[in-house]
Image: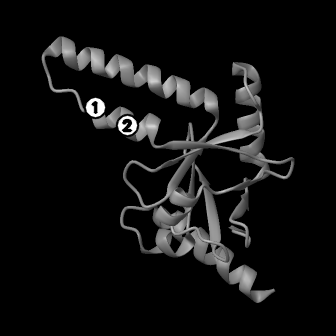
Amino acid sequence: MTAVDGKGRVAIPASMRAVIERNVEAGGGDPRTVVIALHPKDPCLIAYDPAWLKRSHERLERREEALEAEGADVDYNAKRRALAMTESAGFDSSGRFVLPDFYAMKAKLLPGTDAVFSGAGNFFEIWNPDVLLAADGVDPNLKELVEFTRAKRGAK
């Protein structure tokens, strides 16, 4: 858990930052950039390296082609959500970046709140801990970890 500072900055944990930097270096591009998007289901953000955005686009193209070949309806909003509803943010050597205003508002990650980073395979999630604890469908162990971390921080 980390704080969102008064300027709306938050720091990507070092382990997640290292993965982004490695993936971007392997795929080309700026190793200190993260792509921010809304989670497709949960009230949090997702973030990933720019190379994943390209792979995601290719996957959506293949899915559209398969649907068209079957004569099925294509959900054009899927591309809008996955590609147009993203914003890139540069981060410094400490992993700090400014949360884009719209995305911070949607995820309730405003200055003065805390943020929880949770790895999720090809991306990581960024949650307001209050929202995470109240959300249905979130792994109970993750909720317990957030509660434990809060209690430990409060005891200091």
**What's the residue type where badge 2 is placed?**
Arg
Q: Give the image location of residue 21, x and y in percent.
A: 76, 34
Relative to residue 115, is residue 73 drawn left or right? Answer: left
Q: How is the image coloured?
A: one colour
Q: Residue at x 46, y 34 (%)?
A: 83
Q: Residue at x 48, y 71 (%)?
A: 131
Residue 68 percent across, percent down from the top left: 20, 16
Tell me whether circle 2 and circle 1 mark residues in contact (CB < 8 Å): yes
Q: Quadrant of residue 72?
A: top left
Q: Report, in whole angstroms, how far the alpha carbon at label 2 lies from the one at label 1.
A: 7 Å
Q: Nearer the viewer, residue 89 or 114?
A: 89
Q: Residues within 10 Å of mark 2 (few under 14, many from 20)?
A: few
Instruction: From this view, report whether residue 12 is shown above or below residue 142.
Output: above
Label 2's element?
helix
Amino acid type of the residue that numbered disc 1 sits on in the rendered structure:
Tyr
Residue 140 to residue 84: above or below: below
**Residue at 47%, 63% in the rendered image:** 106
Q: Is residue 26 above or below residue 121?
A: above
The residue identified by callout 2 is 80
Q: Is residue 7 above or below residue 77?
A: below
**What's the mark number on residue 76?**
1
In the picture, the disc for residue 85 is none
- In this rendered view, identify the residue nearer to me: 153 or 96: 96
